[in-house]
Image (tube, helix red, strand yellow):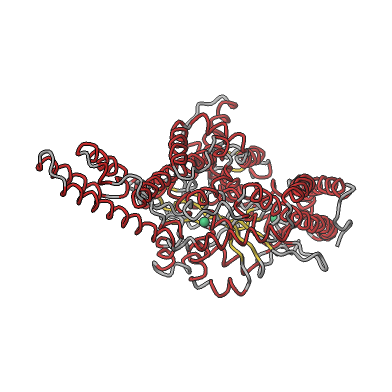
């Protein structure tokens, strides 16, 4: 029949159209490398090549043939996996990334035995069929790969509203209670990223059946797990289910990066997973790039720069995966659940192959980068240490001091708020008294003016400065300067409080704008590559942000008005995105901390350098382990596959030939790997163990 001639019919009986297997293979690969390339585009180009007019029903026919083709591939795959004994549970999870999971005996122990990063994304959503007014077509087919966690497994962590509540009401962060006069009052570190895009939240989730995906990936960006987000935003149950499986498979001493890892860690602890996660010593953290937008206190605990053993793991791999899988969105939005899963699986499986073949490049680049970092940072730090007369223990000490200082702030702002109000009330009373005592001008006018002033005073802190202007206006009008006693302690104190408040308002405003802009930029440039390029961010910021410029000059005015004046900020400070963490220090200008050692800019810079060196050294350690793992995995794989091919060629020739064909591709990639690994190992300053384990 048709298949022996290399064609696949588009219907089981009496096919009128057939598609060649070669065309299907070409389409599969084109679609995997370029997710935007749709079946429709393929059909149109085929029609053009065959000189026949395009008709929409070709799409369905091609799609049917393609489904069958993938099913055949899948079954062949199953047979081959069985022959290779790759069909044990969790085989893919344990073997897809040899660098992470091919553990050898007697290798150097690492602080984190496994590192993963998790995140959710809304772009791969699917419209509910009910919005078309049709009932969903029944499709008994389900996904084929083991990437997916089933909905039932995810819903085990539903726990009613509890887990969700924890996440939504989590607000014991100290930053929340800082009195902020601007309209966007609370500026919680979790909300910095999430709130910056409010349209994400308002979106009606009910019109989508699957509203997105939630995935986990290793630090080499190989995808480990995925699950659908169903008619909801990023609920706690998705990360919980994913982490549950990761813990099951990978066991103890793991590290998981999540862009709201700081808040999620509480949710995790309170969930049914909490005891297990603690027993297995799971460590949550925040991705390196997202971490810069968290508040300073949060960074100290959650930023990978300050976590021992993370090396140069940035924890942002999911963003890269999404930036590529977003391209699929156009095709999956209106597809059936099965076709959506099929498309995502195809995309993921090729992504993983791609990342596997990039492993040795990853190792080589990271090795080079870490060595460079150690070299330059060591030189710089030695110089700094000499000038500042510091030792390594001082840096840890500074870090500790900063932590306890920020911890101590939790209570303060509220007290400040009360005292400002008390000051203001005192001042107001003094003004009232002096007004009553003086009998000049029209009493009615005076009364009206006074009432206006009182309304403003009682209004809110955002109008405090108006009230002040009004009050001083009254003073001038009524000639009561002397009674107000300019220069008295009370008056000066009040003035100081007001200018401090103005200063903080300007600071809050500036911070909000910078974070918003950063968020927009990260969204913008994520569709391309290299979104962390500081230069790029700086340029884009400069181009697009008149608002920031204005806020900056307002800030500088207020900073100059303070007694003693606060240092002025420049444009350059703002575009250093790592500067975001410093906002929290600037805000606390009351207790004069600038005399303390750890707050001196030079010391802070040196401390950051110190931590960077630690991470770079750990990275080298980890890479040494990973290089050996990869080399050993390749060696073992070759022996095993070749033996299996020999057996199969004797017993089951077609399968043997297919495996031989697949192995050629893999062997070619492995050869390149070995070449690059040799390159790394031949460097004079290579510190790992050569050979296999
Ligand atoms: Zn990995
Ligand atoms: Zn945080």
Depth order, front residue of 47/277: 277
**Nearest the camera: 121 or 464?**
464
Residue ranking furthest to the top: 51
Report the front residue among 147 and 334.
Answer: 147
Q: In this view, does 409 lie to the left or right of 392?
A: left
> Considering the image in quadrants, where does the C terminus appear?
bottom right
Residue at the spot x=68%, y=44% of the render? 4
Q: Which residue is drawn at 32% across and 55% down?
A: 423
Is residue 345 shown to the viewer in this render? yes
At 30% from the left and 46% from the top, the residue drawn is 485
Q: Is residue 566 above or below residue 688?
A: above
- Where residue 514 sits: x, y (%)? 49, 41
Quarter of the rendering containing residue 646: bottom right
Q: In which quarter of the image is residue 144?
A: bottom right
Question: Percent from the top left, x then y, of residue 638?
Answer: 83, 56
Front-most of residues 558 and 101: 558
What x and y, as percent, mark residue 35?
57, 40
Assign the N terminus to one quadrant of the image: top right
């Amino acid at each position: 029949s048709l298949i022996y001639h290399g064609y696949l019919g588009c219907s089981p009986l009496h096919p009128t159209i057939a598609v060649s297997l070669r065309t299907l293979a070409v389409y599969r690969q084109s679609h995997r490398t370029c997710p935007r390339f749709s079946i429709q585009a393929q059909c149109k180009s085929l029609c053009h090549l065959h000189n026949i007019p395009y008709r929409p029903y070709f799409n369905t026919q091609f799609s049917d043939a393609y489904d069958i083709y993938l099913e055949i591939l899948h079954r062949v795959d199953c047979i081959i996996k069985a022959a290779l004994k790759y069909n044990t549970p969790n085989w893919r999870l344990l073997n897809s990334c040899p660098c992470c999971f091919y553990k050898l005996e007697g290798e150097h122990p690492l602080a984190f035995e496994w590192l993963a990063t998790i995140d959710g994304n809304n772009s791969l959503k699917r419209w509910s069929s009910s919005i078309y007014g049709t009932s969903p077509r029944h499709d008994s087919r389900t996904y084929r790969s083991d990437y997916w966690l089933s909905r039932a497994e995810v819903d085990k962590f539903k726990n009613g509203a509890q887990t969700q509540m924890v996440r939504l009401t989590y607000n014991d962060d100290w930053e929340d209670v800082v009195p902020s006069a601007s309209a966007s009052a609370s500026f919680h570190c979790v909300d910095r990223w999430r709130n910056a895009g409010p349209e994400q939240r308002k979106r009606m989730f009910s019109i989508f059946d699957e509203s997105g995906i939630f995935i986990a990936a290793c630090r080499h960006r190989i995808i480990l797990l995925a699950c659908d987000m169903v008619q909801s935003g990023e609920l706690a149950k998705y990360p919980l289910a994913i982490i549950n499986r990761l813990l099951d498979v990978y066991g103890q001493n793991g590290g998981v990066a999540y862009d709201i890892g700081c808040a999620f860690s509480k949710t995790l602890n309170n969930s049914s997973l909490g005891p297990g996660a603690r027993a297995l010593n799971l460590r949550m953290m925040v991705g390196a790039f997202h971490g810069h937008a968290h508040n300073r206190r949060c960074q100290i605990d959650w930023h990978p720069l300050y976590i021992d053993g993370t090396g140069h793991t940035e924890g942002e791999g999911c963003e890269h995966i999404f930036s590529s899988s977003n391209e699929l969105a156009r095709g999956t939005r209106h597809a059936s659940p099965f076709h959506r899963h099929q498309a995502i699986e195809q995309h993921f499986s090729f992504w993983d192959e791609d990342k596997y073949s990039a492993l040795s490049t990853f190792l080589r680049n990271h090795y080079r980068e870490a060595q460079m970092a150690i070299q330059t940072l060591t030189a710089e730090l030695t110089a700094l240490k000499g000038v500042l007369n510091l030792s390594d223990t001082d840096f840890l000490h500074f870090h500790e001091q900063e932590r306890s200082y920020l911890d101590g702030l939790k209570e303060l702002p509220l007290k400040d708020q009360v005292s400002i109000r008390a000051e203001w009330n005192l001042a107001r009373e003094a003004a009232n008294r002096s007004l009553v005592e003086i009998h000049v001008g029209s009493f009615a006018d005076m009364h009206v003016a006074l009432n206006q002033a009182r309304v403003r005073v009682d209004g809110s802190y955002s109008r405090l400065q108006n009230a002040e202007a009004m009050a001083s206006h009254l003073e001038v009008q009524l000639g009561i300067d002397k009674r107000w006693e300019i220069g008295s302690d009370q008056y000066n104190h009040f003035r100081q409080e007001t200018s401090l408040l103005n200063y903080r308002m300007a600071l809050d405003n500036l911070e909000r704008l910078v974070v918003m802009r950063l968020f927009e930029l990260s969204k913008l440039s994520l569709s391309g590559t290299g979104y962390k390029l500081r230069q790029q961010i700086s340029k884009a910021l400069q181009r697009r942000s008149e608002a920031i410029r204005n806020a900056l000059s307002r800030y500088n005015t207020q900073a100059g008005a303070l007694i003693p004046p606060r240092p002025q900020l420049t444009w350059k400070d703002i575009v250093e995105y790592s500067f975001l963490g410093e906002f929290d220090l600037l805000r606390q200008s009351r207790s004069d901390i600038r005399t303390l050692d750890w707050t001196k800019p030079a010391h802070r810079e040196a401390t950051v350098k110190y931590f960077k060196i630690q991470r770079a050294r750990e990275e080298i350690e980890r890479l040494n382990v990973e290089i050996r793992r990869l080399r050993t995995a390749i060696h073992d794989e070759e022996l095993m596959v070749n033996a299996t091919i020999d057996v199969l060629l004797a017993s089951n020739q077609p399968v043997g030939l297919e495996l031989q064909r697949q192995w050629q591709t893999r062997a070619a990639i492995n050869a390149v790997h070995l070449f690059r690994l040799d390159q790394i190992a031949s460097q004079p300053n290579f510190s790992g163990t050569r050979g296999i384990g």
